[in-house]
Amino acid sequence: MLLEKTTRMNFLFDFYEALLTDKQRSYMQLYYLDDLSLGEIAESYGISRQAVYDNIRRTEAMLEEYEIKLALFHKFKKRQRVTDQLIKSLSAAQLTNEEIISLVEQLKQD
């Protein structure tokens, strides 16, 4: 479950990073991408561990709100599923031309 949350936050961070403040970006990068502990981040900024924790939790909530409104990650996962299906079916030669066109049209929708 923790790995799933971390993976989701990494994706959301990738999609919405530009919407965050410099401090939010820095904390999220250090915590999720560089795998620093709350204590290590707090020490490097000269603030409390609780302040880092609060900022990261607020930023996670913001990222989830952005996803609810913009759905970039959801659309990405949908395109990945369609692409995977298309590749699998093409390699097995299981699709008609009409089915291939339909899958490509699904990719173009979002």
Image (tube, rainbow, N blue to C red):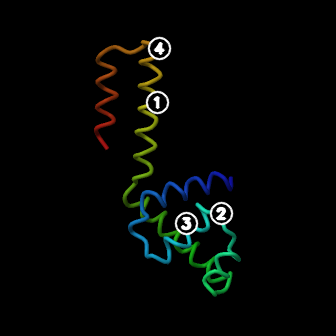
Instruction: Mark 3: give few (<14), some (14-19) or many (20+) Cα within 10 Å.
Output: some
Q: Given the image, on which type of amino acid does mark 2 rest?
A: Asp
Q: Earlier in the sequence, mark 1 or mark 2?
A: 2
The residue carrying mark 4 is 92
Element class at badge 3 = helix
**Which tag is nearer the camera, tag 2 or tag 4?**
2
Residue at mark 2 to residue at mark 4: CA–CA distance: 41 Å
* Relative to 106, residue 34 above or below: below
**Decide: marks 1, 2 in contact (CB < 8 A)?**
no
* Relative to 63, residue 4 above or below: above
Q: Earlier in the sequence, mark 4 or mark 1?
A: 1
Q: Given the image, on which type of amino acid does mark 4 rest?
A: Ala
Instruction: Mark 2: give few (<14), some (14-19) or many (20+) Cα within 10 Å.
Output: few
The residue carrying mark 1 is 84
- The image quadrant where one finds the C terminus is top left
Given residues 14 and 97, the one toward you in this image is 14
For image coordinates 61% across by 63% down, the residue present is 34
- Residue 37: horizontal and vertical position, in percent? 69, 70
